[in-house]
Image: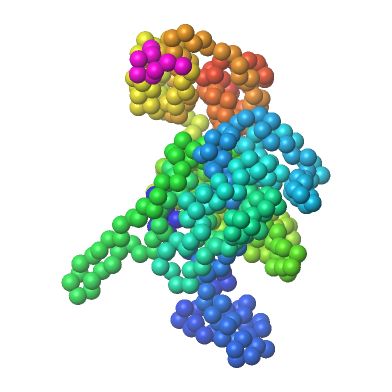
Amino acid sequence: MNPQTGDILGMACYPDYDLNSPYTPNSTLAQTYDSLSDDEKSEALYRMWANKSVSDSYEPGSTFKIITASAALEEGITTPDVENDFTCIGYEVVEDRKIDCWRKYNPHGSQSLRKALQNSCNPAFIQLGQRIGASTLYKYYQAFGLFETTNSGLYGEQNSIFHNLEEVGPVELATYAFGQRFQITPLQMITAISCVANDGVLMKPNIIKSITNTDTGAVTETQPTKVRQVLSKSTTEQIKSMMESVVLEGTGKNVQVTGYSIGGKSGTSEPTESNKDDGYVSSFVAISPIEDTQVVILLTLYDPQNKDYGYQGGQVAAPTVSQMLSEILPYLGVTSDATENDTTSDNLITVPEVRNKTITEAKKILSNAGFVCKVTSSGDENSTLVADQTPKPGVQLTKNSIMMLYGEGDTVGTSVSVPDLSGMTVAQATNALRSKNLNISFSGSGVVTTQDYSVNELVPEGTVITVNLKPTLTDAH
């Protein structure tokens, strides 16, 4: 899906069938077709023809944690990088139920929201769901359009299956928070994720690009349909940053494509006790590029049978999404950032002097230059002057580096500890530093071998950490 327009760029279901011979069973149905009664054969053909992306609902599993996290950030309940915000001991007890984490024998321990999303930790999201509350979650489900069909115009589109709000108890709230025990269609799911990718604007899915009058030759182009603003842009920027962390550091590493920024989330939902024969549902949702997202992909695998990798979405679905993106992004004309390790002056921005300007003016100058501004001041930004800035003027940095601005009377603190960057790629090191409002300057390619500030050294926010990289043996090979 193109999140900016709602255009469905591609939709496929497997096993498929021959459109030129629709009454011929496909290879899967053919195995049992002759043993069926006439009524069963008719029903089986209708099932074969069904567009499962709109006619079938499923439990989305952990991909839905993006929705839970979005509601929490929009409501101001937490922020991405609060240390020790959640605790995982391998399970969470809700009423009389013990709900396990997938890593119950090696618990995640204390985590921030970013780490919880990276780790796909169910106990952390149960705790988050309890903070949000059922009524607030339902408000966002409604806003994301999950209580109604997307009105796509596709034949047989089904709606979701949720409990009525008054029927949602502690256990339902817990499982909803990590994406289980309710059902939505894949089309509803990708439309909601596309809303996050589109700065919080929900778009109606569109399957018709244009209509041509064959008598007159007149062409009518279909215009994008905006449904509503669901989230603020600041919230979606945080969510997309966390989705990128999932790909760089968490369960989505297998979706990476060289030269492209990708955010994503894996999902694995288990069958209920009464439907064990249905097997697991494994999925992966990805957005790319992180900035100005052009494509959102959702891949859903029903009862995957992979003896080598099992059924986890990050293992069986992510590699396929990676292959798809490696072909789709160049086809769409999305420019590869294969030269991300090029630190020549052509790719760097010089930090301008903004001291003694009003905070409002300074923010405008820095934003126009390509930087992200963070302000520490209790005064009116329209009249308060910038007393200090970090980094200082003249430093050359990459786009989206963080600029700390301090108003009159505010002092530069030294409260941020430098993380250990050894062995990280540029993207991973950049992500680790930006989560602490720190910047990076680098030379070389490969992985980080040295850094100019020692691990856990306290530095002011905005400080530039210089690292050197060298190829690993694998890189060289």
Q: Nearer the viewer, residue 347 or 412?
A: 412
Residue occupying image coordinates x 77% and y 46%? 93
Q: Nearer the viewer, residue 439 or 72?
A: 72
Give the residue at x 51% y 59%. Answer: 147
Q: Nearer the viewer, residue 141 or 431?
A: 141
Q: Residue furthest top?
A: 409
Residue 474 locus on image (x, y percent): 65, 39
Q: Looking at the image, what colour scheme do you see?
A: rainbow
Q: Position of residue 429 (x, y in %)?
A: 59, 29
Nearer to us in this view, 19 or 280 = 280
Position of 37 compared to 231: left or right? right
- Residue 355 visible, this angle: yes
Tell me: residue 74, above or below residue 1.
above
**Residue 37 vertical placement versus 454 (above, below):** below
Q: Is 214 contained in the magenta span?
A: no
User: Image height check: is 233 above or below 142?
Assistant: above
Can you tell which quarter of the image residue 291 is in? top left
* Residues shaded magenta: 377-385
| Secondary structure character of the magenta stretch overall | loop
